Each structure stands twice: as structure tokens, then as C-alpha cells.
């Protein structure tokens, strides 16, 4: 694995990480003088909030700027498609940025914009998800009337999933960085080196943000940043599946397992509680882990510790499926079984954390 990473490493990766890192620092400084960048007072009071002070939520600006610079480093065979993809991504990014700057955009509209951006990618690039590793369904996906809507559903789910896990310092950016590295290794093993290069390039862009975001939460991704990294990652995965027939779609799914599993759990949970699918709550796994740490170990006044510690606790659960995806990159059967196994572990872990929080809450009341 280390040798494969060395093969696809390029010196300009460091420059892209530096652009992202410096961009985040510039935003933090500018926020002192531009109130729009400081975050909204209502953000700290939101039901899903896990922070207690105003913090810039426009880290996506730094990531978007670095991605813009990455166009100049794109491998020649991908340049035309990469530019088309960047145009589609920009539409979604600026709608998310509008929300981050305090101009309200409803969740439904944001979701529709993600779907629209993915449709624009399909039109400009001319590709959609061609298979999922199930013979009869793969035949149906070849028809655009089925394949395109299915692709839009998957891409919207992943992009929204990264927004859902963007609650504690470093979790979304760590997940994105390691997912991009995992995709790079899958592309490398299938001898798709240009895409491996692009994936590693994206990993370094996100890592530049991660260095500022973790552990102190000096800047947040915001909706624009979270949607962007999810959108880019899912389309990188689709590009690998389209161009490398030996790569299992289930292996690619394993690299994006955590945000997808959290999205599925949120839908199931809200349907069961008869709540709107778009309404926020405080029952995501990362929220339960942080509350469990506060109740059992740290106390509610140590959120500056419990918040980043939650990311450390969850890191093995995030990375393990990605490692499985790398190992099982060309096996539909075993990659599928790994997805099922990790889903079981995810839901058991969720049930255990709900029980821990509820038991200790009752104990503190008595």
C-alpha cells in the first residue's frame, strides 16, 4: 500500500494542501472584520449543534479555491471531463455557500440543487453509474431512464451524508481524506493511474482543511464544503466503476460507507418516529458518542475535549470499511458481504450507544 501511494504521489499535491490550509487561515482572519463570515448566532442554538461559540462556516471556500487550482494539475486525458465536472459542482457549491453566509436556503431546495448538479454532470460528461454488481439490475442500469435516476439518488445520498456527519471537529474531513486515499489505491490497483492521481490530489486538498479544523474547530466545512466533498467523492467512485470493469461497485461503496450508513439510519429513524426526513435531530452516531463521553467520563462542560475525542473514537469504524474496500476491490461477492457485515456492526453500535446514553441519563436523574 505504501509503495502504491508513492507511485501516485506528485509534488504539486503539497501545493494544493497548502492552498487549502492557507485559505482556511485567511478566512478565519477575515471573519474578524466581515460579520457574514463569523457564523450565525442561531447556529449554536440549533437542535443538531455540537458547538457553543460562533465559528466561520465557510471552510468550503478554501476547498473550492484549491479544487479550482487543481484543474491546472489534472492529467491530460481527464482535463475536458474534469472541467465539465467542475462547472456542475460550482452550481451546487454556490447554493450551499448562500446558506452558509446566512441567506436561508431550505434543505429541500439544497437537495434538489445537488440532484440538478449531478444531472448536469451526466449531460456534460455523458456517464452514469453503469452497474452495482448484480447481473439483472446491471442490465437495467444500461438504460438511461433507469440508470440516470438511480445515479442521481446515489450521488444525492452521499453528498447529503457528508453534511449529516459534519457535526464534530474533523469527522467529515477525516472521512473524506481517507475515502479519497482508498479510492486512489483502488484506482491504482486496477491500473487507472490518472484517476488515482486525481483522487490523491483531492485527498490533499481536504487534508489542508483538516489541519485547521481538527482538533480545535477553528473553521467548519459548512453546507457548501460538506456537499462539495461528498459530491466529488461519489463521482470519483462512479468514474472508476465506469472505466475499470474489474472494480466492484460494492468496494467503492465501502470507501463511502460511513456517510451512507448514517444517511440510511437517519431516514429509518425519522420514518419510524413519523418525523420529516429533512428535519434535524440529535440522534446521529457521532452525537450519541459525544454525549456518551460527556455523561460517562468528561461532564457536559468539557465539550472542547469530548468533541474532538469523538472523532478519535469513531476513526476505526470509519477507516475499517475503507480498508476492506481496498482489499476486496475486484470481488463483488466478498465486498457485498463486507457491506452487510459493516451495516450490522453499525446498527449494533448505534443501539448500544442509545442504551448507554439513556441509562446514564436516567441514573443522573435519580
Image (spheres, grey):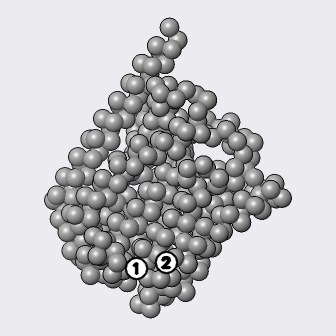
Report how far apart the C-alphas of labels 2 and 1 lie in the structure: 7 Å
- Does the CB distance between marks 2 and 1 fall below 8 Å? yes
Total number of numbered labels?
A: 2
Position of residue 292 in the picture relative to residue 42 (left or right): left
Front residue of 14 and 57: 14
Front residue of 230 and 139: 230
Q: Position of residue 167 (x, y in %)?
A: 54, 45
Of all residues, the one furthest to the top in this rendering is 366
Q: Which residue is mark 2?
A: 13
Front residue of 138 and 96: 96
Quarter location, residue 325: bottom left
With respect to residue 123, does 302 lie above or below? Answer: above
Q: Position of residue 289 (x, y in %)?
A: 45, 35
Position of residue 293 in the picture relative to residue 44 (left or right): left
Q: Which residue is mark 1?
A: 9
For label 1, the SS is loop
Residue drawn at the location 22% of the way across and 52% of the way down: 338
Position of residue 124 in the picture relative to residue 331 (left or right): right
With respect to residue 354, does 53 lie above or below? Answer: below
**Can residue 159 be seen here?**
no
Of all residues, the one furthest to the right in this rendering is 33
Quadrant position of the N terminus in the picture:
bottom left
For label 2, the SS is helix
**Can residue 9 be seen here?**
yes
Residue drawn at the location 37% of the way across and 35% of the way down: 350
Residue drawn at the location 40% of the way across and 79% of the way down: 9
Q: Position of residue 127 (x, y in %)?
A: 39, 77
With respect to residue 272, does 27 lie above or below? Answer: below
Residue drawn at the location 52% of the way across and 52% of the way down: 170
Q: Position of residue 201 (x, y in %)?
A: 46, 75
Amino acid at each position: 500500500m505504501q509503495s502504491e501511494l508513492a507511485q501516485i504521489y506528485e509534488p504539486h499535491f503539497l501545493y494544493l494542501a497548502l492552498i487549502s490550509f492557507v485559505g482556511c487561515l485567511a478566512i478565519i482572519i477575515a471573519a474578524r472584520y466581515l460579520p457574514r463570515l463569523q457564523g450565525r448566532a442561531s447556529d449554536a442554538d440549533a437542535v443538531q449543534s455540537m458547538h457553543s461559540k460562533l465559528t466561520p462556516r465557510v471552510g468550503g471556500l478554501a476547498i473550492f479555491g484549491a479544487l479550482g487550482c487543481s484543474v491546472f494539475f489534472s492529467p491530460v486525458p481527464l482535463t475536458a471531463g474534469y472541467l465539465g465536472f467542475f462547472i456542475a459542482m460550482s452550481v451546487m457549491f454556490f447554493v450551499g455557500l448562500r446558506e452558509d453566509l446566512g441567506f436561508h436556503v431550505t434543505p429541500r431546495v439544497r437537495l434538489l440543487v445537488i440532484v440538478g448538479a449531478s444531472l448536469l454532470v451526466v449531460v456534460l460528461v455523458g456517464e452514469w453509474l453503469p452497474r452495482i454488481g448484480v447481473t439483472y439490475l446491471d442490465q437495467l442500469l444500461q438504460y438511461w431512464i433507469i440508470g440516470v435516476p438511480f445515479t442521481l439518488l446515489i450521488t444525492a445520498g452521499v453528498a447529503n451524508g457528508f453534511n449529516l456527519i459534519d457535526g464534530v471537529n474533523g469527522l467529515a474531513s477525516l472521512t473524506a481524506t481517507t475515502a479519497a486515499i482508498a479510492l486512489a489505491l483502488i484506482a491504482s490497483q486496477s491500473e487507472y493511474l490518472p484517476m488515482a492521481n486525481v483522487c490523491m490530489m483531492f485527498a490533499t486538498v481536504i487534508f489542508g482543511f483538516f489541519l485547521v479544523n481538527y482538533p480545535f474547530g477553528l473553521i467548519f466545512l459548512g453546507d457548501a464544503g460538506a456537499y462539495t466533498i461528498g459530491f466529488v467523492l461519489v463521482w470519483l467512485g462512479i468514474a472508476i466503476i465506469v472505466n475499470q470493469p474489474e472494480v466492484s461497485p460494492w468496494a467503492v461503496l465501502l470507501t463511502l460507507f460511513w456517510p451512507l450508513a448514517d444517511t440510511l439510519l437517519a431516514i429509518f429513524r425519522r420514518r419510524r418516529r413519523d418525523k420529516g426526513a429533512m428535519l434535524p435531530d440529535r440522534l446521529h452516531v457521532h452525537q450519541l458518542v459525544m454525549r456518551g463521553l460527556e455523561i460517562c467520563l468528561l461532564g457536559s462542560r468539557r465539550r472542547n475535549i469530548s468533541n474532538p475525542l469523538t472523532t478519535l473514537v469513531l476513526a476505526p469504524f470509519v477507516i475499517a470499511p475503507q480498508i476492506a474496500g481496498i482489499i476486496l476491490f475486484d470481488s463483488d461477492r466478498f465486498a457485498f458481504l463486507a457491506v452487510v457485515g459493516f451495516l450490522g456492526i453499525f446498527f449494533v453500535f448505534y443501539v448500544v450507544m442509545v442504551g448507554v446514553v439513556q441509562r446514564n441519563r436516567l441514573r443522573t436523574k435519580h
